[in-house]
Every structure is written in C-alpha cells, then in structure tokens.
Image (cartoon, rainbow, N blue to C red):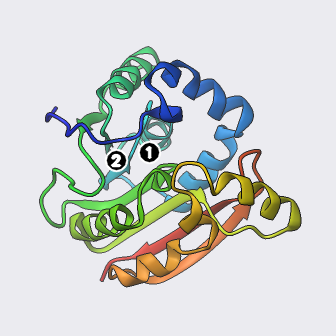
C-alpha cells in the first residue's frame, strides 16, 4: 500500500467513532439495500477491473467481489485504519482477491485508462467543491474509454420531509452541493456524458440519490 497524505475525514468524522461506522450504516442507513441497488446498477462483468472509490471498511467492495468473483476489484481509501478493518472483514468471509490501496480521490495512484468501472458510495459528501471536481477529473482519467462511473450519495430532496432533513444536514460536513443537486452537473463539467440520475431513496440522514455517467 502507498503512504496516504494526512488529509481525509475519518468515518463518522472522528477517529474514535470509526468502530461505530459499520453499525450506523447497517442499522440506521439501511446500507444493505442501497448498496445492493448500486451494485445492480454497476452490473459487474467477468474480467472487468473495478475501483471502489472511498471504500471505507470494505462492505461494498466485498459485496461487489462476491457478486462477480471473476472481476478484479480494488478498494481505495485515505484512512489506513478502515482499510485494516476492510482486510479483516474480507479475510473472515473468504474473499482474498480484493486489492486494498491507500490513496485519495483527488489524486488517484493509478495510470490513465486502468479501470472499466468506478463505483463510490457515501464518500463524495465528505469532499469540498474543488475536491469533488478534482476527484471527478481523476475518475475520468483512470476510466477506460466507454467506462462508467456509478455513484450513491446524498442528493436533491424530492419531498417535504427530505427537504427538512437536508436543511439540517447541509450544515454538517460538506453536503450542501449534494443537496442542491449539483452532482450531475459536476460530472458533465468534468467530461462525463450520458449522465443521469437513476433513482432516489429516503434515508434517516437525508435523501440518497443514484447517478451514472460514461467516459468517451
């Protein structure tokens, strides 16, 4: 693993809360449901090389590899602590083929055109607007022509309850751009085409949206 730069937001914002990250996502955010939906959208195929960007403790990465054992799956995160948890989780369930890398979304440690697909879940709202733009440029760079980018994250509210929740949550972390619905326009701005929102869900912490874009 490469050495990380010391600039990332730990799981749940504080290092001491990292052990609570998995239970929070599983029991409060309904992690299993929205991650299965994202994997269905991604539709991993045999022989594809797929990057889970901001993989955290590796739940989505492991689900992706188990869904398509013949794909080459890479999990990347800036926090060595969560990658250690991810490795141990993979070992427990007998998924040994995943590669775990340390790195940041706005400076990916990979060559140009090295992945068929990039998938990310609940990571982008941790980034500032300039960091989001840099991250999208980097994803575009490492995708092969015809490759696809798949996102699940906070998005624009679609009903009164979610607008209320978003009005509170937008003051926390860096979620305002997400709740304003800017993710698709940022994807277009950084060179993706056929960008579309593929669905949305209500969640305890706010509205979740799914997006997809292609690289020419």
131 relative to 39 in the view: left or right: left
From this view, report whether residue 116 is shown above or below residue 37. below
Q: Which residue is mark 1?
A: 68
Label 1 sits on a secondary structure element that is loop
Q: Is residue 209 left or right of residue 112?
A: right
**How far across and how far down the image is residue 49, in percent?**
28, 53
Decide which of 19, 90 is in the foreground and name it.
19
The answer to whether residue 103 is left or right of residue 33 is left
User: Marks 2 and 1: CB-CB under 8 Å?
Assistant: yes
**Label ID, residue 71:** 2
Is residue 17 shown above or below 196?
above
> Which one is nearer the viewer's eye here, 198 or 72?
198
- Quadrant, the N terminus: top left
- Mark 1: few/some/many CA within 10 Å (<14, 14-19, 20+): some
Q: Quadrant of residue 58?
A: top left
The residue lying toward the viewer, choosing from 77 and 180, is 180
In 3D space, how far apart are the residues under numbered discs 2 and 1 (Cα atoms)?
6 Å
């Amino acid at each position: 693993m490469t050495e990380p730069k010391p600039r990332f937001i730990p799981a749940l914002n504080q290092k001491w809360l990292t052990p609570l990250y998995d239970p929070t996502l599983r029991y409060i955010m309904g992690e299993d449901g929205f991650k299965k939906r994202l994997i269905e959208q991604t539709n991993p195929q045999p022989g594809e090389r797929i990057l889970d960007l901001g993989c955290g403790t590796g739940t989505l990465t492991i689900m992706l590899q188990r869904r398509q054992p013949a794909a080459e799956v890479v999990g990347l995160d800036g926090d060595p602590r969560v990658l250690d948890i991810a490795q141990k989780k993979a070992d427990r369930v007998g998924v040994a083929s995943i590669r775990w890398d340390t790195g940041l979304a706005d400076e990916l440690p990979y060559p140009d055109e090295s992945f068929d697909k990039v998938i990310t879940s609940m990571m982008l709202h941790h980034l500032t607007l300039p960091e989001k733009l840099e991250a999208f440029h980097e994803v575009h760079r490492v995708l092969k022509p015809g490759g696809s980018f798949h996102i699940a994250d906070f998005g624009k509210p679609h009903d009164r309850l979610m607008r209320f929740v978003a009005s509170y949550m937008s003051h926390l972390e860096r979620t305002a751009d997400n709740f304003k619905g800017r993710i698709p326009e940022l994807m277009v701005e950084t060179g993706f085409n056929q960008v579309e929102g593929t669905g949305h869900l209500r969640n305890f912490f706010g509205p979740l949206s799914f997006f997809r874009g292609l690289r020419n």
